[in-house]
Image (spheres, rainbow, N blue to C red):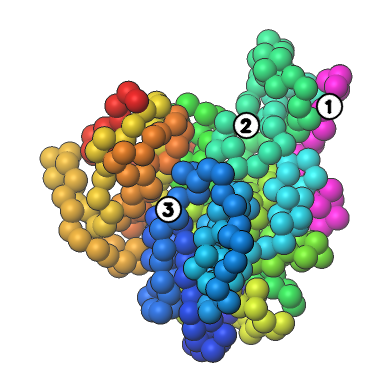
Amino acid sequence: MLTISGVPSGEGTNLLRRHAPDLTWQDRSPFLGASAAPVIPWLRIARRDHRRETDVELPASCPAPRGVAVSFAPEDGLGARAWAAAAGLRLLAADSAAVATAADKITSLALFERAGVATPRTWVVTDDFPADATGSLVVQRRANNLTGKGTRFVTTPEQLTGVLREWSGETLRVSAHVPGVPVTVSGCVMRQSTVVSALSHQLVGIPSLTPYWGAHCGNQLIADDDLPSGAAARCREVCAAVGNQLGRLGFLGAFGLDLLVTPAGAALAIEINPRFQTVVSLVQAQERAAGLLPCLGTHVLASLLQSVPVEEVRTPCLRLSQIVITADRAGVLRTGVASGVHLLAQGRLLPQGEGDLAALRPGEALLWAHAHPGDRIRPGEELAVLQLPGPVAPVRAHPELSAEALRWIRAVRQELVIEDD
């Protein structure tokens, strides 16, 4: 079982129909919108790949907004705003200054302090390295959304010297390494409060998926008792406190909070992702099962209304998981994968057509293509997201993936062919 809060589905859907009858979700893949669509059947899904956008400018003249739009990463350049304006849609995105403050790994430390939440012992390094920063350390560049490439785990003076030389001239965040389970809490800042939704175990630095120690590799939904006693409640409290501070900055809408849960059950704040995260696809299936409005709809209501009804519920945990398949080299994608439900037969994917994440049966997987034939690919770039109807790893730090998960990964990689450009 788990405790989550949200907008009651019936009331929420009625409010959405009244205030957002013309609603579009834009992203490079439909995966997140698709998990909300069963409750928001009029939702339109538009493909927009922000990675392929260059030299974007806002149109000089635009039609009057006839509806509203929500985007996966509206802070990445002007692409989302330009697309929405040209389509006659009002983009519902958080305040850009608040997003920048929350996303920055340095300025977010002050936000955590104001929220009264604990973090690992941390130093901000601009010049000389502090003498008391010893032992195992996590060194991070301040920018967000670096997909793990901006985080290094160092255990020796030689490793530390190498990282400091490589990132010379940058302001760095250095934290004491604390053993624990990486947990993501999905939330939504509203004008009157912060909605705290599902918790997930964040899969980070899985060697079979990435060479980067801090890279995001996927998530799996977890129940309260998957964590030490009382830790899940503390995670929710931390998320609410951080969300309330975001609200004071003028932030409204969906966000994710990365925490570290120690063996003793402490919940330490690591970083804020002030946007929709990939895991929201799983979270929305959990919200639907609990009789709550999916996060996408909650984000829309938070952006449009002064007050929205919210309730807290206890609900069975859906054991859903997802794995992010990334490129291991640069090149051009020659063959990709087909989005939809698949079976595995003798190590090969068997497409079964479209399907709903919440309706997956044992032995099935829902695959979403995030790159397509002809795309130029960089190392670490997302190629596909693989969603499964069960856990893929034990709930602990840097776990080994299950044999079934590894079989699915091999089958997906077999379909993905990257050639030299």
Please state the horizontal and vertical placement of residue 196, each as a whole percent of the image.
Answer: 63, 67
Question: Do the residues under discs 2 and 3 have CB atoms within 8 angstroms?
Answer: no
Task: Give the CA distance from mark 3 to mark 1.
Answer: 37 Å
State whether residue 336 appears in this view: yes
User: Is 23 above or below relative to 29?
Assistant: below
Task: Give the CA distance from mark 2 to mark 3.
Answer: 23 Å
First along the sequence among labels 2 and 1: 1
**What's the amino acid at mark 1?**
Thr
Question: Is residue 123 located in the magenta-colored stretch of the structure?
Answer: yes
Tell me the quarter of the picture where residue 131 sits: top right
Say what secondary structure mark 3 lies in. loop
Task: Give the CA distance from mark 2 to mark 1.
Answer: 16 Å
The reply, left or right, for residue 65 in relation to residue 177 is left
Tell me the quarter of the picture where residue 160 sits: top right
First along the sequence among labels 3 and 1: 3
User: Is 95 above or below relative to 182?
Assistant: below
Residue positioned 31% across, 35% down in the render:
333
Neighbours of disc 3 within 10 Å: few (<14), some (14-19), many (20+): some
User: Is 363 above or below relative to 194?
Assistant: above
State whether residue 407 appears in this view: no
Question: Is residue 65 located in the magenta-colored stretch of the structure?
Answer: no
User: Which residues are drawn in magenta?
Assistant: 109-132
Residue position marked by numbered label 3 in the rendering: 28
Residue position marked by numbered label 2 in the rendering: 150
Q: Residue 61 carries which label?
A: none
Residue position marked by numbered label 1 in the rendering: 126
Towards the viewer: 374 or 360: 374
Say what secondary structure mark 2 lies in. loop
Towards the viewer: 152 or 97: 97
First along the sequence among labels 2 and 3: 3
- Residue that lies at the very extreme toward the left in this rendered image: 346
